[in-house]
Amino acid sequence: MMPFYSYDIPHTCGPDPKICCQFDFKRLPGGRINCPWKVPPRAITEANVAERAALLLDQYRKKSRLFRSNVLLVPLGDDFRYDKPQEWDAQFFNYQRLFDFFNSRPNLHVQAQFGTLSDYFDALYKRTGVEPGARPPGFPVLSGDFFSYADREDHYWTGYYTSRPFYKSLDRVLEAHLRGAEVLYSLAAAHSRHSGLAGRYPLSDFTLLTEARRTLGLFQHHDAITGTAKEAVVVDYGVRLLRSLVNLKQVIIHAAHYLVLGDKETYHFDPEAPFLQVDDTRLSHDALPERTVIQLDSLPRFVVLFNPLEQERFSMVSLLVNSPRVRVLSEEGQPLAVQISAHWSSATEVVPDVYQVSVPVRLPALGLGVLQLQLGLDGHRTLPSSVRVYLHGRQLSVSRHEAFPLRVIDSGSSDFALSNRYMQVWFSGLTGLLKSIRRVDEEQEQQVDMEFLVYGTRTSKDKSGAYLFLPDGEAKPYVPKEPPVLHVTEGPFFSEVVAYYEHVHQVVRLYNLPGVEGLSLDISSLVDIRDYVNKELALRIHTDIDSQGIFFTDLNGFQVQPRRYLKKLPLQANFYPMPVMAYIQDAHKRLTLHTAQALGVSSLKDGQLEVILDRRLMQDDNRGLGQGLKDNKRTCNRFRLLLERRTVGSEPDFFSKLAAMFRGLIFHSSRSGNREVQDSHSTSYPSLLSHLTSMYLNTPALALPVARTQLPGPGLRSFHPLASSLPCDFHLLNLRTLQAEEDTLPSVEMALILHRKGFDCGLEAKNLGFNCTTSQGKVALGSLFHGLDVVFLQPTSLTLLYPLASPSNSTDVYLEPMEIATFRLRLG
């Protein structure tokens, strides 16, 4: 790619920056910047053009020796360039004089011009005599990505994978809300038009969607999502993210209000008196969300539940209420069994008059469900959680409540287990952290040992910062000042262990539900390292999986890339970004860590996975930020840990060797002439269960209470927008309303974006309790939407800029695995 130090002009014309800098005409004498090599550029004139051209051409020729063809690309620019007309003129006219000189002298054997990347590749294909896009003979192929990257010495840019995790998390919360709001708005607009009520519906919410899209897009900037912006800029990003999140909650509330009404004629939009309340609120852009407490009184309260997934889901919904005496009824008025728990504000204090009621519910795909809450006790169905608090000898008083059995254990540290229908999970009585998992149909326990670790930074002049991870050696165990207080909660629908440490509160929850929810462990780490000085907190998982130095991380949640631990590289070079998941595996097992926020991950020894949770660094690392990383927030990192078993005969090596035989994955190394076979770990995919687990984690159901001021009644009905769930290897990336010619108005057309996932079917999916069907890539869109017809369907390019075919009468579509397809769609 760039054979020399950097992409700036002193390092792109050839190997000598002292010479190349003389051809950066923004640095002409009298300007604001100059050449650090003390030889300034000179304007090109008739008098000096021959000498200057010879000097530059010598650099071009030296650079060209590094490439397989004599077509050379010389980038001409840098950060914050071409912002003044004077620079355009200085660069263009001086270079044009040089090019004219080159091109008018055949004896120089050079043809030079300004050009784009397309011009460069067209010239390269022409020179090598191949069709555009084909591989020129003898050219090597690079596959994979450019992680991990070092610009000099051992300065690996692997710190920013984790920097400012609070905002990496907020980004994902906004992303999930944006998709949910786009889909629900599109469905509400289509149904309101179908019913002739579009005039009553707030179609103007479209402007809020547009603003939120722009905010999310802005935050993908390479100094935003990375956590490498200045503190004041981070605040500006945070304010924008929060404003868009609040607006999207309003869009969801308005759409859910319309869609959940049984009699649409009764619909009335009043922005001053919203029909629904939000599920949670954030007091500021850097605060964690606070869940809405539902006030119960003599009248029943209703809650509308939104499932943004394209699959029907059976999930646990937890609500906060002001009384432990609560009955929950289904939409039809059937009493439901619920688990009721105290709501803790700390290791020893409960929040007065706030209780958590957890109810398992089945929600329609992309749809809305309805629950009714009443004051009153149903002894058979309102089931209290029991709690044990381990104090480990600390003299603390624990608040109690008569509604919940509570045992305080002053000392003692024997290990204990929680279990559900699928597994038994063991915890350390001392640390409260995970130790092992045993599936109920197996005798053998699987070691899954967790520990917290701390990385320091170097004592030399180069230290870790927002970009760089420069540890002072291997991580050291996290040693708390006092032993943790442990809460062990058990109940019919979920059990959990909370370990309260000084810098992290870790919750490991086990759902006792059939299907996706019950097959993995729900883990959250509330991290607060605001008193750390040049330290990073990590979570490491030790297993007995024979991973042989290989681990896997995703790229943008789209594909999975194998990573190999390289002992010859420094520790920090072995970290990689984990946007959605990372896993290790052997011939029998796979352990996947799913994440709800992008963080840095590694596997430094066989059977290990470790993730950096947060980092606090007191100095700049000289990559342009000019600040340390000192604005840490209380941050909640959320994960799912999934242990899967391979079916016999589906070992990863077996499949890849078979694929290598059939696909002839043998290529000739143009230099050595020897034959090599690609690494047998070159492709890997999550299982279907793993894909669904990731969706459940990143797309939670939203619980929207009906406002107290609204009259309750039988008028609320669950909303089932799809005639059936999509095949479970399909993901509805978006169903978003397109804008009309008038910029701020919605059109009647939508963009439907579908993704068919690639998955590994060698991981056991039988009898796991989740109903999941695939359809060999076919989807009948014509019969997909309940109560609406597809009146127009046109395949387009991913960006909708180009039609790929004429609008079709057929509404059946087919996608290959790993493909994404976009359609223009009109529903009527």
Image (cartoon, rainbow, N blue to C red):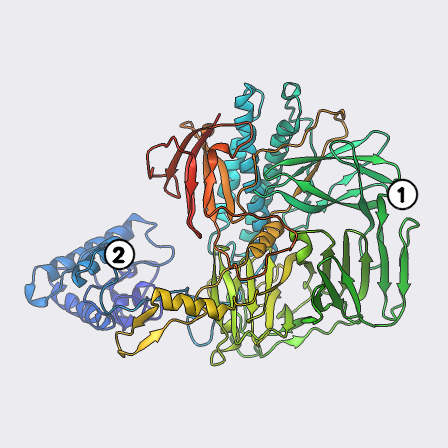
Disc 1 residue type (three-letter): Gly
Work out whether 264 lies above or below 393: above
Q: Quadrant of the N terminus?
A: bottom left
- Is residue 749 found left or right of 643 in the rendered image? left
Position in image of residue 433 (x %, y %): 73, 67
Q: Nearer the viewer, residue 454 or 761?
A: 761
- Is residue 508 found left or right of 12 in the rendered image? right
Tell me how far mark 2 sits from mark 1, CA to CA: 70 Å
- Res. 463 image quadrant: bottom right
- Res. 672 image quadrant: bottom left
Crowd around label 2: few <14 · some 14–19 · many ≥20 (10 Å): few
Work out whether 775 lies above or below 71: above
Residue where numbered disc 2 is placed: 133
Q: Can residue 353 be seen in this snapshot?
A: no
Query: Can you tell which mark lies on residue 379?
Result: 1
Q: Identify the residue at the far bottom of this view.
A: 568
Q: Identify the residue at the far front of this view.
A: 649
Q: Nearer the viewer, residue 321 or 720?
A: 720
Where disc 2 sits, the SS reads loop
Q: Can residue 466 be seen in this snapshot?
A: yes
Position in image of residue 514 (x %, y %): 69, 51
Q: Nearer the viewer, residue 435 or 257?
A: 435
Disc 2 residue type (three-letter): Gly
Where disc 1 sits, the SS reads loop
Crowd around label 1: few <14 · some 14–19 · many ≥20 (10 Å): few
Query: Can you tell which mark lies on residue 307?
Result: none
